[in-house]
Image (cartoon, rainbow, N blue to C red):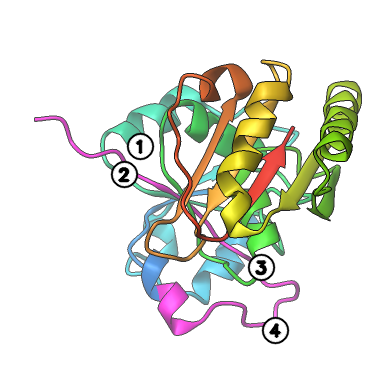
């Protein structure tokens, strides 16, 4: 029988060495992890030492992911498909936002590997971290235009900027318009645009999925009236 796939956990790191950024409950979520993808090994070990992991630092499998090394996706794929979980953290702050990691998260979405955030202090940053989209160049829009024609023009402007600059746009909607917003996007966006749906973050129905518009068109997604964030890139 095939083992259940592992998961990728996105972990915040303290902004300075004297700061404590994880609650006891958050620590419990990651204390059993043995595999970690990090920006640089030395600061990662310092951050992990404070968490109280069940394994010693010497026993941890620490893999660097930065501009100076090539990440081994095949190794990651084999381990996580064998049921092993991974933690992802950068030197400080949140991974994937002006830091490495979005390439790993995008790979997980493409291969149907679940991504979970340990840091749910903001639905906006959580959705961006877990989207696998551009965390170096992004803009939070707030709510879309209510008028249908203005909304269409607004979305077309976003698509153009995405294709020209690879910028990520993040926006929200009132829950009763979740489904119509989703349908507006998949009916107007070019097929190669990517859309991430971050639905019911931290709630019992949490779902964060990123696909191309072409892929979403094949998905009969139905969004109920829970908080939802949309990202396009």
Q: Does residue 40 appear anywhere in the picture?
A: no
Q: Are marks 1 and 2 in contact (CB under 8 Å)?
A: yes
State left or right for residue 104 relative to residue 94.
left
State the SS at label 1. helix
Q: Are marks 3 and 2 in contact (CB under 8 Å)?
A: no
Query: Residue shown at 62%/72% (left/top)?
Result: 121
Give the label, 3 or 1, closer to the camera: 3
Q: Which residue is mark 3?
A: 122
State the SS at label 2. loop
Q: Considering only order in the chain, which callout, 2 or 4, is on the residue closer to the N terminus?
A: 4
The segment highlighted magenta reads 1-27
State left or right for residue 222 relative to residue 69.
left
| Mark 1 → mark 2, Cα distance in angstroms | 5 Å
| Mark 4 → mark 3, Cα distance in angstroms | 23 Å
Q: Which residue is mark 1?
A: 80
Q: Which residue is mark 2?
A: 84
Dividing the picture into quarters, in which one does residue 56 lie? bottom left
Give the label, 4 or 1, closer to the camera: 1
Instruction: State which quarter of the image contains the N terminus.
Output: top left
| Mark 4 → mark 2, Cα distance in angstroms | 31 Å
In front of the other: 214 or 77: 214
Q: Considering only order in the chain, which callout, 2 or 3, is on the residue closer to the N terminus?
A: 2
């Amino acid at each position: 029988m095939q083992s259940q796939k592992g998961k990728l956990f996105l972990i915040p790191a303290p902004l300075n060495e004297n700061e404590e950024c994880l609650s006891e409950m958050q620590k419990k979520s990651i204390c059993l992890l043995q595999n970690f993808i990090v920006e640089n090994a030395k600061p990662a070990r310092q951050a992990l030492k404070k968490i109280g992991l069940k394994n010693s630092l010497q026993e941890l499998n620490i893999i660097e992911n930065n501009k100076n090394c090539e990440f081994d996706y095949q190794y990651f794929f084999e381990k996580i498909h064998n049921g092993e979980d991974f933690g992802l953290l950068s030197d400080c702050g949140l991974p994937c936002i002006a830091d490495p990691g979005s390439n790993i998260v995008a790979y997980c979405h493409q291969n149907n590997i679940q991504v979970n955030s340990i840091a749910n202090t903001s639905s906006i940053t959580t959705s961006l971290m877990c989207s696998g989209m551009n965390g170096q160049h992004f803009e939070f829009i707030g709510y879309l235009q209510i008028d249908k024609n203005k909304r269409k023009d607004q979305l077309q402007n976003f698509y153009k900027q995405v294709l020209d600059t690879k910028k990520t746009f993040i926006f929200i909607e009132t829950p009763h318009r979740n489904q119509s917003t989703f349908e507006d996007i998949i009916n107007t966006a070019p097929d190669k645009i990517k859309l991430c749906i971050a639905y019911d973050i931290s709630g019992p129905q949490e779902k964060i999925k990123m696909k191309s518009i072409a892929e979403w068109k094949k998905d009969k997604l139905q969004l109920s009236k829970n908080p939802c964030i949309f990202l396009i890139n």
